[in-house]
Image: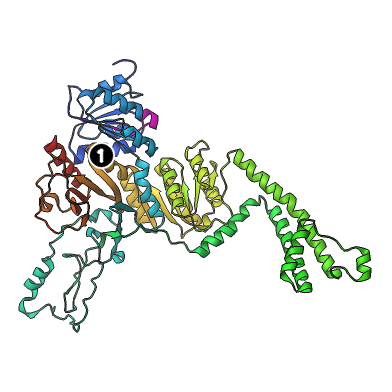
């Protein structure tokens, strides 16, 4: 090895392998995806084998080699056999570094599949055009919707064909669901969850009833028969083979079987679920938010006293004149100091504008107007001065029912931006004054609490008492957990959402805290990166607690291994469920396509809900058959 790099290069020549560049959490999860689910040889290029997740990556069985280079240079690419590799994933480093590495890799191997992480998605789309076979993904953009939705207490959604798919649990499940995606849900033991359980055919329930009751009809001993009438809408859990049901046309009620646990289902909404915020609450926030322009309690007291005096004097003028329009007119002139005072001769002749009480009221209004002018000037100077100094805006007294985002890294910036776009008030907290997300928050007008003091004080400044949720998404599990516990201590009713990498840590978190959620950025993003590396398009990731359900759209191309397969061949319990089909001859998306015997032809597109292992199986078919 040269002085530029060292480590453990492949002992023997390797080919048809996949290269992962990075030693962070996303790289760790991605390597696990490729080794465990796709069963492909992986070579990892890290900057330091002793830091971050590099030591854990070395312990993964199936990793062909871990090579250490401080930078992704030409020599580093040759050390990991870039010329014979099938794919390259760049999941660490800045956007500029990843762009340079991707272009260099294509120069060595024009046919290699390149997937690179980009925070600037617009720039990534432009770079994709420069690559023959590349895809730009953002781990933070993939994971942010799950964090934002968890903060609002509802599942995130994925847009497919103008509709939005989301996960509903138990009583929230409606009869028009697409399919059950999980059962045996035990919130105290998440290991019991079964993803994509076996689904029986449409006639399975009728066959079961006929076999059980025979000619006597669907009357369970001890059950209740209802009078004939409209068909009863089944309960949310009433999936064939799982819950309850009724005999069509008779309204006969069949007792439900004992459920082994909670149920989750995939549902379609005609539009993306918005965040309901009444106009009255918005108006109240706007009114209270104007107080942010008043920079001190003393100034607020001065202005409120002057305003009360003006209103009192205005009332006196209105009472004396009985003319509201004239009262407004003269009051505004007095505030501006432009009113024409009565002359002694006019008073003596009895031709003045009013009596002593009216003249006193005008004097009060004029004096208060003199008070308003310098205060308004000071407010404008303070606001403009703060903007020019680039200082972020502090939370105002009108901030209510907001979400506090702790950490303005890539993920925190995405989460804050998404919540802001939904119309939800947001306050950010950041200890590093140089964090890149501060400028983005300032551009959106989001208040930012800066400082490295205790979380208790920082959360108080972020108005924790009036917040609805705290989302801790810094890069350190311990810091996130500390923020969540301090938030719950300061506000027992606040919802907490924590970014955690360690699954065991997350399990204890769920058991200890109520009204809480845990998400892992790498766990949500790694399956999308792995699928993209294999050539599939993952449209989004839905969370079922700590489990990830992928929504992917696959195209049947000439030479693809999907040609000739039908739903029986594609689906498997616990792995893949076909939820929609788009045929080549039409652009219409058929949801819940019932024909299980129709075989796929070139040009068809299928939308599947899949686990990580299930999507890996489909991608293996694509790679092996078409490769």
Within the magenta stretch, is there residue 93?
A: yes
Q: How many marks?
A: 1
Within the magenta stretch, is there residue 295?
A: no
Residue 507 in the image: state x and y as whole percent.
32, 51
Using the image as rendered, state which of residue 320 and residue 606 is in the foreground.
320
Residue located 24% across and 73% down the image? 233
- Seen as rendered, the residue at the extreme top is 2
Q: Which residue is mark 1?
A: 532
Is 350 drawn above or below residue 277 in the view shown?
below
Residue 405 in the image: state x and y as whole percent.
46, 48
Judge left or right: residue 475 versus residue 260: right
Residue 343 in the image: state x and y as whole percent.
90, 63
Image quadrant of residue 23? top left
Q: How is the image coloured?
A: rainbow
Inspect this view and state whether residue 26 appears. Answer: yes
For disc 1, the neighbor class at 10 Å (few under 14, some 14 to 19, many from 20) is: many
Question: Could you tell me which secondary element the residue under label 1 belongs to?
Answer: helix
Judge left or right: residue 410 versus residue 164: right
In which quadrant of the rendered image does the C terminus lie? top left
Residue located 63% across and 43% down the image? 384
Is 355 drawn above or below residue 436 in the view shown?
below
Inspect this view and state whether residue 94 appears. Answer: no
In which quadrant of the rendered image does the N terminus lie? top left
Image quadrant of residue 285? bottom right
Residue 76 in the image: state x and y as whole percent.
29, 22
Image quadrant of residue 109? top left
Judge left or right: residue 312 versus residue 110: right
Residue numbers of the magenta segment = 86-98
């Amino acid at each position: 090895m040269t002085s530029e790099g060292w480590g453990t290069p492949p002992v023997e020549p390797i080919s048809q392998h996949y290269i992962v560049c990075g030693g962070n959490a996303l790289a760790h999860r991605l390597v696990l995806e490729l080794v465990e689910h796709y069963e492909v040889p992986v070579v990892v290029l890290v900057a330091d084998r002793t830091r971050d997740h590099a030591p854990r990556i070395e312990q993964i069985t199936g990793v062909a080699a871990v090579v250490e280079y401080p930078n992704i240079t030409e020599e580093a690419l040759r050390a990991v056999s870039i010329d014979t590799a099938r794919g390259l994933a760049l999941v660490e480093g800045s956007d500029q570094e990843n762009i340079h590495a991707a272009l260099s890799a294509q120069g060595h191997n024009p046919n290699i599949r390149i997937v690179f992480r980009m925070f600037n998605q617009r720039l990534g789309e432009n770079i994709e055009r420069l690559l023959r076979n590349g895809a730009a993904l953002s781990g933070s953009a993939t994971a942010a919707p799950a964090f934002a939705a968890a903060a609002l207490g509802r599942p995130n959604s994925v847009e497919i064909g103008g509709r939005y798919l989301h996960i509903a649990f138990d009583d929230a499940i409606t009869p028009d669901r697409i399919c059950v995606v999980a059962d045996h849900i035990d919130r105290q033991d998440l290991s019991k969850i079964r993803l994509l359980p076996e689904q029986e055919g449409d006639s399975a329930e009728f066959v079961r009833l006929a076999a059980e009751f025979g000619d006597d009809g669907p009357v369970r001993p001890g059950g209740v028969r209802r009078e004939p009438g409209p068909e009863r809408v089944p309960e949310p859990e009433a999936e064939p083979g799982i819950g309850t049901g009724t005999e069509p046309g008779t309204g006969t009620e069949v007792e439900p079987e004992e459920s082994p646990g909670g149920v989750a289902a995939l549902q379609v909404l005609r539009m993306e679920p918005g965040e309901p915020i009444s106009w009255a609450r918005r108006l109240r926030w706007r009114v209270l938010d104007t107080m942010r322009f008043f920079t001190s309690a003393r100034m607020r007291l001065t202005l409120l006293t002057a305003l009360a005096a003006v209103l009192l004097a205005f009332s006196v003028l209105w009472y004396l004149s009985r003319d509201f329009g004239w009262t407004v007119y003269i009051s505004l002139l007095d505030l501006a100091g432009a009113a024409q005072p009565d002359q002694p001769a006019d008073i003596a002749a009895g031709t003045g504008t009013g009596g002593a009480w009216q003249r006193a009221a005008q004097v009060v209004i004029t004096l208060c107007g003199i008070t308003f002018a310098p205060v308004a000037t000071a407010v404008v100077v303070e606001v403009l001065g703060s903007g020019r100094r680039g200082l972020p805006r502090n939370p105002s007294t009108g901030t209510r029912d907001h979400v506090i985002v702790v950490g303005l890294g890539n993920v925190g910036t995405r989460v804050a931006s998404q919540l802001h776009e939904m119309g939800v008030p947001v306050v950010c907290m950041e200890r590093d004054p140089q964090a890149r997300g501060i400028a983005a928050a300032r551009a959106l007008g989001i208040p930012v609490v800066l400082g490295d003091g205790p979380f208790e004080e920082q959360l108080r400044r972020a108005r924790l008492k009036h917040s609805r949720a705290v989302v801790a998404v810094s890069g350190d599990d311990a810091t996130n957990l500390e923020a969540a516990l301090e938030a719950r201590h300061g506000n027992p009713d606040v919802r907490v959402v924590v970014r955690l990498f360690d699954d065991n840590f997350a399990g204890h978190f769920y058991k200890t805290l109520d009204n809480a959620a845990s998400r892992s950025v790498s766990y949500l993003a790694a399956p999308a990166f792995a699928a993209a590396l294999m050539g599939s398009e993952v449209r989004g990731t839905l969370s079922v607690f700590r489990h990830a359900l992928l929504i992917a759209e696959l195209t049947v191309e000439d030479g693809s291994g999907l040609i000739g397969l039908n739903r029986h061949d594609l689906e498997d319990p616990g792995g893949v469920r076909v939820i929609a089909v788009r045929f080549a001859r039409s652009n219409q998306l058929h949801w819940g396509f019932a024909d299980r015997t129709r075989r796929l032809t070139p040009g068809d597109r299928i939308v599947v809900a899949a686990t990580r292992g299930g999507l890996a199986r489909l991608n293996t078919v694509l790679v092996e058959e078409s490769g």
